[in-house]
Amino acid sequence: MNGTVNGTNVTNGTNILPVIVVHGGACNIPQHKIKPSEEGVKQAAIVGHKVLAAGGNCVDAVTAAVACLEDNPWFDAGRGSDLNADGEVEMHAMVMRGDTCDIGGVVSLKLIKNPIEAAKLVLYESHHCLLDGPASLKMAREHNLAEESPEYFVTEECRENWKNKSAYKNVIKDFFSSEDGHDTVGAVALDVHGNLACATSTGGIASQLPGRVSDSPLSGCGGFADNESAAVSTTGHGESIMKVNLARLIAMHVEHGLSPTAATTKALNHMRRRVTGNGGAISVDARGRIGVQHSTNHMTWARIGGMRNDDETPSNNVVEYGSNQTNGRQEKI
């Protein structure tokens, strides 16, 4: 029997419960930002889960969840993006689908309210995987994506951070070693059709050189999705993530038999040992097992559905969320 019943796919007697996991960035979050950041990821997970519960596909679900985070000024993506060395916003995003391994990404995009929507356009409306700023802006305008003025994206806090931090290397030290900043956002999902997808979006790091490309729009780095392994979205120091291909490394460990939790932990440990890089990642495999791990002090995250281990019974009417991998709180939805 084929079809959907209460958001559950029924195919040959097998029920697939949808899963959504989101993150708001792995970094060191000051105390006053923790509560609104946790609330933000919780709401994003609910938004993405509504798509899945209605029988929608995983690409639409992760896009909706990430767009919710891009609209929230507490996060470094869309509104709230950090300023580069010239005081301008350059945004990057990607979406990847696990059934075909097709990718859509945008680099150094300006003015488009939701870069993740522009990335989805590249995925569905082009024969390419990644477009630069002018090309992606042109495509976004051709499809009437919402635009905002440059001022819309800049919060007062980001402007103050830019004024006070003129050296990029000092920003990196502070960002991941002291209580400051916010970071990349992302989502992964398993839909009722058994397909996986990931989405990642960022406004970069304060005082970065104009034209710097982060890990976020790059397949295998900022995200990766393959139905034969896992969907992954990463966060942290972009250059470190690129050096070890963190997202693909996590998926490879899943292919080799590790659970998403064990695979993510192993890959993060490798990144810290090999290139002294810190970060985090969320992941989900085709069985609905999830990973939520980070090597920084904090990573805000939320999930609906899924299992951290084989003994857990997944629930699609509870959202779990927190600011590190061990402090999850649950609420009914």
Image (cartoon, rainbow, N blue to C red):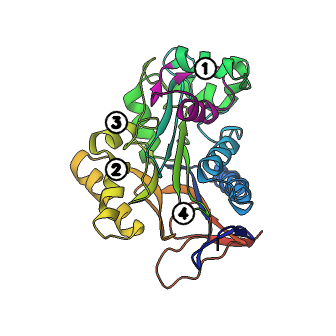
Q: Which residue position holds label 2?
A: 248
The residue type indicated by label 1 comes to: Met
Who is closer to the viewer here, 56 or 117?
Answer: 56
Choose mark 2 or mark 1, whichever is in front: 1
Lower sequence index among marks 4 and 2 = 4
For residue 123: magenta?
A: yes
The residue type indicated by label 2 comes to: Arg
The residue type indicated by label 3 comes to: Glu
Q: Is residue 141 left or right of residue 280?
A: right
Q: Which residue position holds label 4?
A: 194
The residue type indicated by label 4 comes to: Gly
Who is closer to the viewer here, 180 or 107?
Answer: 107
Lower sequence index among marks 1 and 3 = 1
Q: Residue at x 75, y 60 (%)?
A: 54
Lower sequence index among marks 2 and 1 = 1
Q: Which residue position holds label 1?
A: 139
